[in-house]
Amino acid sequence: MAGFLDRAKETAQRGLDAGKQKVEEVQAARAGHELLRKLGAAYYAEKRGSGSPEEVDKALTAVEAHIARHGDAFLRGGSPLL
């Protein structure tokens, strides 16, 4: 009986770990989409004359830092609400 309970506990723990990893992936994707939105807004503002190249550079640097930490999977499409 103890062996069964140990296996059940291990299975439950693996499920919790997988769920936690998925939540972290979704949060990283949402953050990446938000950074892309800010980059687009900064670029648009610069082209319309109300923004600056520095704001675009700052937003681009933030996107690049996010990619370095979390990868670029969020760039391949998909919903930001995943």
Image (spheres, grey):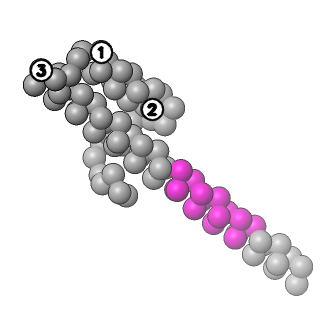
Q: Residues within 10 Å of mark 3 (few under 14, many from 20)?
A: few
Counting residues from the N terminus, which is met first, the one under dot 2 or under dot 3? 3
Q: Which residue is mark 1?
A: 54
- SS label for mark 2: helix
Relative to 67, residue 81 above or below: below
- In the drawing, does residue 8 fall left or right of residue 64? right
Relative to 3, residue 14 above or below: above
Q: Quadrant of the C terminus?
A: bottom left
Q: As drawn, which residue projects farthest toward the bottom?
A: 1
> As rendered, which of 9 and 46 lies closer to the eye?
46
Counting residues from the N terminus, which is met first, the one under dot 3 or under dot 1? 3
Q: Which residue is mark 3?
A: 49
- SS label for mark 1: helix
Regarding residue 49, the answer to whether it shows in the image is yes
Q: Residue at x 28, y 39 (%)?
A: 37
Q: Which residue is mark 2?
A: 66
Residue 7 image point, x, y percent:
78, 72
Indicate the quadrant where residue 62 lies: top left
- In the drawing, does residue 17 fall left or right of residue 24? right
- In the drawing, does residue 58 fall left or right of residue 9? left
Q: Amino acid at mark 2?
A: His
> As rendered, which of 73 and 57 lies closer to the eye?
57
Whole-angstrom CA distance, mark 3 to mark 1, is 13 Å
Q: Amino acid at mark 1?
A: Glu
Q: Read off the magenta span.
A: 10-24
